Image (cartoon, rainbow, N blue to C red):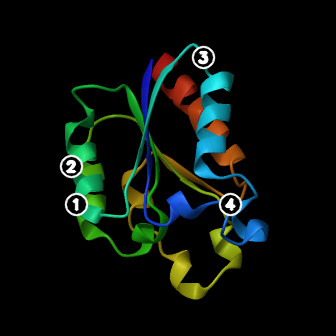
Amino acid sequence: MKILIINGPNLNMLGKRDAAQYGSLNLDNIESTILSSFANHEIKFFQSNLEGEIVEIIQTASDKYNAIVINPGGYSHTSVAIRDALELCTLPKIEVHLSNLASREDFRHTMITAAKCDGYISGFKENGYFAAIYLIEKIISK
């Protein structure tokens, strides 16, 4: 199985951000742990702070991957462009957020991108990625 994991803005700064919200691991630590835990899958990681780059990789994902796990970061609350790209993408898609968005500021409660995914996981720090991959396996095996 080929899975694309997309990380949006500021996720390249993990390890420097509030550990209580985001965990103590940096993005490289999370990626290496995922790769060792799911060695039976081909997993590609992509991180960008730029909305257009995220849109472009979603638009081309159907030709190369079986599923997407996306943490759009702050774009989850603002990006109609990423939402529209997710809507057009026919792959199984799960949105992940490291922090528990329901316990945070009101503006973080609206996730316009999550509406175009099969579901979302919030609040389990790096474990959300593992849960998403597990769920992708279940979705695809049906």
Q: Which mark is residue 21?
A: none
Q: Is residue 142 visible?
A: no
- Residue 75, relative to residue 45: is it above or below? below
- 10 Å crowding of disc 3: few (<14), some (14-19), many (20+): few
Residue 18 image position (x, y, % from top left): 71, 72
| Comes first in the chain, label 4 or label 3 | 4
Sooner in the amino-acid sequence: mark 3 or mark 1: 3
Label 1 or label 4, whichever comes before in sequence order = 4
Amino acid type for the residue under numbered disc 4: Gly
Q: CA distance from mark 1 to mark 2?
A: 6 Å
Specify the farthest residue to the right.
20
Circle 2 residues within 10 Å: few <14, some 14–19, many ≥20:
few
29 or 58: nearer the viewer: 29
The image quarter in which residue 122 lies:
bottom right
Q: How far is mark 4 from mark 3, CA to CA?
A: 24 Å
Q: Is residue 47 left or right of residue 12?
A: left
Compare residues 65 and 9 and report the one nearer the observer: 9
Residue located at (20% from left, 44% from top):
59
- Residue 39's tag is 3
Measure the C-alpha gap from mark 1 to mark 4.
25 Å
In the figure, residue 100 lies in which quadrant? Answer: bottom right
Q: Quadrant of residue 123?
A: bottom right
Q: Earlier in the sequence, mark 4 or mark 2?
A: 4
Callout 4–callout 3 Cβ contact below 8 Å: no
**Which amino acid, by three-letter code, is at mark 2?**
Glu
- Of helix, strand and loop, which one carries label 3? loop
Q: Which residue is mark 4?
A: 15
Check contact, mark 1 vs mark 2: CB within 8 A: yes
Residue under pointer 1: 52
